[in-house]
Image: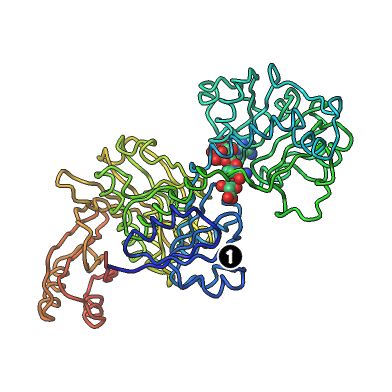
Amino acid sequence: MEKFKVLITDHIAEEGVKILLDSGNIEVEEKPGISHDELKKIIGDYDAIITRSGTTVTADLLENPGKLKIIGRAGVGLDNVDIEAASKKGIIVMNAPTGNTLAATELTMGMMLAAARKIPAANNSLKNGEWNRKKFMGIQLFNKTLGIVGLGRIGSNVAIRAKSFGMKIVAYDPYIKKSKADSLGVTLFEKLEDLLKISDIITFHTPLTKETKNMITKKQIEMMKDGVILVNCARGGIINEDDLYEALKSGKVFTAAIDVFEKEPPKGNKLLELDNLFVTPHIGANTEEGQKGVAVIIAEQIVNALQGKSYMNAVNIPFMKSQLPLDLQIYFELIEKIGKLAAQTIKGRPDEIKITLVGEKFEEDICERTFDTPFSYQPFTIAAIKGFLEVSMQETVSYINAPYFAKDRSINVVESKREVYDKYNDLLVFEVVTDKEKRVIAGTVFNDNEGRIVLFDDFRLDIIPKGTFIYFRNYDRPGVIGKVGTILGSNNINIAGFELARQSGGEALAFVSVDNQITEEVLNEIKKIDGMIEANVVEI
Ligand code: NAD
Ligand code: MLT
């Protein structure tokens, strides 16, 4: 059995380590707190690394990734992993998004109560010998409006719990369906401002993205009610820390409860000087159950991925072939081969690749992606791009990096859907336009469950794309085919299949499937046949 090595760079629960060790072929090394430089030196010796928020996985760290195949994040947030850099190196990035949801939800509830009743300050005051009941006047949660920014896993669970306190819940999340908010009994606002204006308490549960960084600055705080309470157990940087400082000082914000900071640990952060700010050191996920949860999930996923089994939560693999129904898996393989064939038969630099899904088979829900990746291509497009690019590229093209390589090469990728195409009800059409020419190749699957190429530009064909072919175009006149046969025969090359198609314009196209390798000399002989327009060997 192939042996693998996994490096754990932050502390994770032992239940996760045990799963890796019990797998039988995984050796584990734990180096919590390893420095960036040290990690860079050794990262390539491991098949997978497991991190938490303590390790920042940068492009520089992945410059020479050696045998690294997987970056596993024991937690939700991936703001500490350069997903694009990993994808370009073909490395799978996966997280454990559900393991600590309730841990973070419950901390949020605790922080909300702590901020509303100033519990941490009251605790410190009493322990410092004071008995000052007047100083710790709080506000009641009942009947107050809670604004939830980000109604995902944690946001939704906060909503459910806050309802039992008798709070009115409103939310802002431009990426969820209204029906989800409705089912939670939450009013979903179109604009963040609307939530800011009416909420008594606002809690943040979004990832840190370009959009959410500094989502709350002085301008947004000014829109809020006087005496608002803010809670952030999501990511530092969502609320601008300087502006929060001013608002807490002025009393515009009554209290704030913060688990996460722009820079962690927040050494020297002036926010920590304020009496009306309550803080915890990024412990949202720190419950026995939460830590066990993420460790077990990430360990199981890594074992499965390394052992070639299907796994969940890869954020840079937009789909899993094994998750497609069997008939669509055949189409998936077919379009990849079509991409390969197109690359071997077209001249010039590609400007555009267009994939058209034809027929009801390719329902959107089958192809729908559940992962947050920079590309939203459906599986067939990625397979097609992969097949096309791997012919010309030195690097190993994978389903992960193919879309990035296409983007780097400024290839415009277009997807479309049609009811019918030509005489076909179910078809995948691959069109590529280069600076020199255009090619259209289409394939379908018949009842024998074999993927077939049925259209090649204006030619109708029936080819099972498997093996070595001589592809040629010639003027449609007697003798050409015979001469090809003679050349192959005299060179002891066995013809396994012959597919010929003609065009009204007087051109013919042929794919000759052969059992043996075609040498340069044989190909040159074929190219010299009178009436030959072009000839090439293609491997599919
Ligand atoms: P999730 O993906 O289930 O939910 C995030 C939600 O934010 C999604 O519904 C998404 O649509 C929404 N969103 C994205 N961009 C938005 C925007 N611009 N405006 C409004 N909404 C937006 O994630 P989750 O599991 O609920 O985690 C939420 C956050 O909590 C993440 O940042 C995660 O890293 C963090 N987290 C922190 C801790 C901790 O220790 N403090 C623990 C777990 C999770
Ligand atoms: C997460 O994103 O899962 C949390 O921030 C917890 C962690 O980093 O450990």
Q: Position of residue 400 (x, y in %)?
A: 44, 57
Answer with the quarter of the image where residue 3 lies.
bottom left
132 sits to left or right of 90: right
Quarter occupied by the C terminus:
bottom left
Say above or below: 171 vs 41: above
Residue type at tag 1: Ala
Quarter occupied by the N terminus:
bottom left
69 sits to left or right of 112: left
The answer to whether residue 68 of the structure is visible from this angle is yes
Identify the residue shown where x is 41% and y is 46%. Answer: 378
**Most distant residue in the right direction:** 250
Q: Position of residue 54 (x, y in %)?
A: 61, 58
Answer with the quarter of the image where residue 134 lies.
top right
Neighbour tally class for label 1: few under 14, some 14-19, many 20 plus, Cα within 10 Å: some
Q: Position of residue 363 (x, y in %)?
A: 35, 36
Residue of label 1: 59
Q: Is mark 1 within 8 Å of ligand 2?
A: no
317 sits to left or right of 310: right
Say which of 111 and 424 sits in front. 111
Report the number of numbered marks. 1
Say above or below: 376 vs 439: above
Say above or below: 386 vs 448: below
**Most distant residue in the front direction:** 129
381 sits to left or right of 335: right
Say which of 324 and 247 sits in front. 247
Q: Position of residue 14 (x, y in %)?
A: 46, 55
Identify the residue shown where x is 73% and y is 37%. Answer: 257
> Disc 1 on helix, strand or loop?
loop
The answer to whether residue 77 of the structure is visible from this angle is no
Say which of 256 and 226 sits in front. 256
Say which of 540 and 87 sits in front. 87
